[in-house]
Image (cartoon, helix red, strand yellow):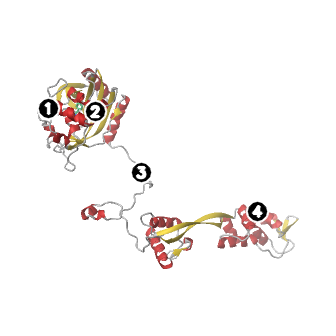
Amino acid sequence: MSTTEELQTLVLTILDAKGTIPNTKDLVTSDNKEVDQLALLGALKSLSIADKEMVKYETIEEEIWVLTDEGNEIADKGSHEAKVFDAIPVGEEGIAISALREILDETAKIGQGKAFKNKWVIKRGDNLVRAVDSIIDQTRIDLEVIRSTGTHSDPKVLFELRKRKLCDKHKVISYSVSKGPKFSLTIEKQARDVTFEMLQSGEWKTANFKKYNFDALGIPPSGGHLHPLMKVREEFRQIFFEMGFEEMPTNKFVESSFWNFDSLFQPQQHPARDAHDTFFLKDPAICTQFPTEYLKRVKEVHSIGGYGSTGYGYDWKIEEAQKLILRTHTTAVSSFMLYNLAQQKEFKPVKYFSIDRVFRNETVDATHLAEFHQVEGVIADKGLTLGDLIGFMNTFFNKMGVKNLRFKPAYNPYTEPSMEIFSYHQGLGKWVEMGNSGMFRPEMLEPMGLDPEVRVIAWGLG
Ligand code: PHE
């Protein structure tokens, strides 16, 4: 079979020479083979798509009659009734029916009836005898005509032979092709991908790109399994869902310093905001869209305090908050979600969780990467206490099979009290840190507009 390119060249050269192709069923390839119309359709389609328009084509639907296997057999060797006639010797005696069966088998059975009907044979005792000198095998002749012309002048014959399952009607599709407005002999190769070379040379600006085919089906993967990290992530998710948590949208790896630090009451001169610990973006380097009123309240609580706090007493700068970074913890998302919660008319308790990537500018070694996953949970309700946090941690870790938990006082700019969570690792024979937790500070929650009665317990793992 010819390739799409070969078929396209064939069509284009004929169009160039003759102007049109009335019916593609008459096309032959350079090595004198019939053209597969389905393959041709592919070639025509790609020559006629909207941004190419090199050719125009219309579909021609024709009916042709084709012989079945049995029909072909008869066209080659004669009908059953003719075989019966031929098997009977000339003369008065003829042949015994049982002997005929032996020679012709099935054919004897099928052919006899028809041979009687045609008055070619008669029965004499147990024998069959010829009734005429010679016969004309019309069935065979008709089938030969159909085979070579695809039809027959007498519709009754076609009807009859089809009933006998010797031939059948088929639909054949072919095409009439003419030149399109952008006809040319050369097919411009369309680029499929933006390559490194194209970017470097600037060729991507002028390249003719192949349109994306959104209808194309993907290649089904032959197999696969979850990445170990994704398996653990699934386990955590299931536990959270079981406990009635909603998943937070964590699809923003790039965050403003405002949501990652300032909204969390993390002072601007805090060491974590240093380029040693945080990845800063160069282009674009800043973000300028923040909720104005809230931004003002954050600035105030940092610089002069409020909500019963004295604040940090420093000169808070918007330029620092505007800096774009790769988020250093998923608490940036929690903060954004709590701000949104505070904007609801009526407070309703929530349980949120997230599991996603965070980034820190660490020296990479065997146990440290510049990116890792955090599991984070947030519960907001009136009257929650540290006891709730400890209780919740125990239930959560028990569900994962971690039994021995210990809590150690810690410090976070955004939580008070804060606790590090440890669990005893049987294999390592020591206490290992699992995560960090606490109750979000009023300096973080109240500027958002949350009711001062609302307490938020939160923890991060990983
Ligand atoms: N953001 C903290 C970390 O990255 C974890 C944490 C989340 C602590 C929520 C307290 C509350 O370690």
The residue tagged 1 is 303
Q: Residue at x 86, y 68 (%)?
A: 122
Would residue 13 appear left or right of 409 to someone viewing this image? right
Q: Nearer the viewer, residue 272 or 260?
A: 260
Marking on residue 110: 4
Structural distance between the alpha carbons of marks 3 and 4: 52 Å
The image position of residue 377, as x and y in percent, is 29, 31
Structural distance between the alpha carbons of marks 2 and 4: 89 Å
The residue tagged 3 is 222
- N-term mark: 3 or 4: 4
The residue tagged 2 is 339
The image position of residue 246, as x and y in percent, is 35, 32
Q: Secondary structure at mark 3?
A: loop
- N-term mark: 1 or 3: 3
Q: Amino acid at mark 2?
A: Tyr
Give ligand 1's quarter of the image.
top left
With respect to residue 257, does 90 lie above or below? below
Q: Secondary structure at mark 1?
A: helix
